[in-house]
Amino acid sequence: MKVGLFIPCYIDQFYPQVGIATLSLLEKLGCEVVYPQGQTCCGQPMANSGFEHLTGGCNELFVKNFADFDYIVSPSGSCTLHIKDHLHVHDKEDAATHIRQHIYELSEFLTDVLQVKHLSARFPYKVGIHQSCHGQRGLHLSQMTELVAAPYSKPQQLLQMVEGLELIELSRKDECCGFGGTFCVFEEAVSVKMGKDRVADHEKHGAEYITGNDVSCLMHLEGILKRQQSKVKVLHIAEILNAAF
């Protein structure tokens, strides 16, 4: 299958190693991966701030870059959900519909499309999973604890295939970290307090690493960890699934 690799802005600018790990992992699993050089922002920051009517150029460019792929894969739950819910181009709606129906967050793609049963990764550390809100409540990557239903977690399913990795249990395993895109700018104090609570939960249960599906949330937690001079580190799930420590 031919896969278009969608790398969001903040990964491209601040965490390029996540994009590289995603590419490497997909190629290991037999995908033909193409990174369209003309891709830019998907428009989520504008839409989240109430200016979705200004994202037309972003939408048109996204369709131009990704219309011809069997699947589009991204290591970002929030950006993936934005495209799924908001990508529309009035004169290219068939192409936009194809993209909306064939774009996947990485762990979703690995479990639901490739149906991965084995990984060659090794990561001998204690790891806590941060369930990002967009991924959990928007893409349904894992079950919400407030629902009376059988638990599941696609990220956890994949991490359990990694040799030597020990998943820790959290007291509040699906609590928001407080990042929330522009929320962390407009409500800085609340955002920081929520992030500190998430960090404390991981530290309390002995995590050596915090992982997740959204670099934005991990970036927020990493900033708090560094300011507290904590030994706990953050890694995107793609980096762990591609690891060979």
Image (cartoon, rainbow, N blue to C red):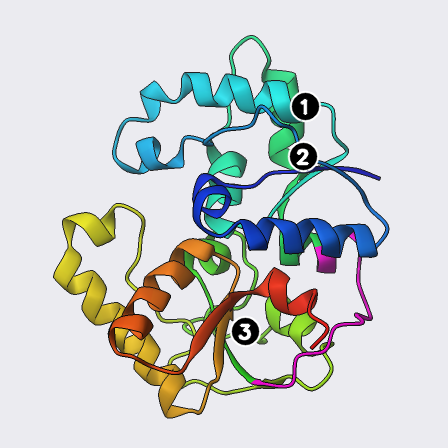
Q: Quadrant of the N terminus?
A: top right
Labels 2, 3: front one: 2
Query: Mainly helix, strand or loop, the magenta region?
Result: loop
- Residue linked to disc 1: 67
Q: Quadrant of the C terminus?
A: bottom right
Q: Is residue 32 left or right of residue 154?
A: right
**Mark 2 touching mark 3, by CB under 8 A?**
no
Above or below, comparing residue 153 to residue 76 in the picture: below
Residue 176 visible somewhere in the drawing? no
The label number, if any, that marks residue 116 in the structure image: none
Q: Is residue 108 magenta?
A: no
Above or below, comparing residue 208 to residue 195 in the picture: below
Q: CA distance from mark 2 to mark 3?
A: 38 Å
The magenta segment is 110-125
Q: Nearer the viewer, residue 88 or 3?
A: 3
Q: Residues within 10 Å of mark 3 (few under 14, many from 20)?
A: few
Q: Tell me the quarter of the picture where residue 159 sits.
A: bottom right
- Residue linked to disc 2: 35
Q: Is residue 119 magenta?
A: yes
Disc on the earlier residue, 2 or 3: 2
The label number, if any, that marks residue 149 in the structure image: 3
**Mark 2 touching mark 1, by CB under 8 A?**
no
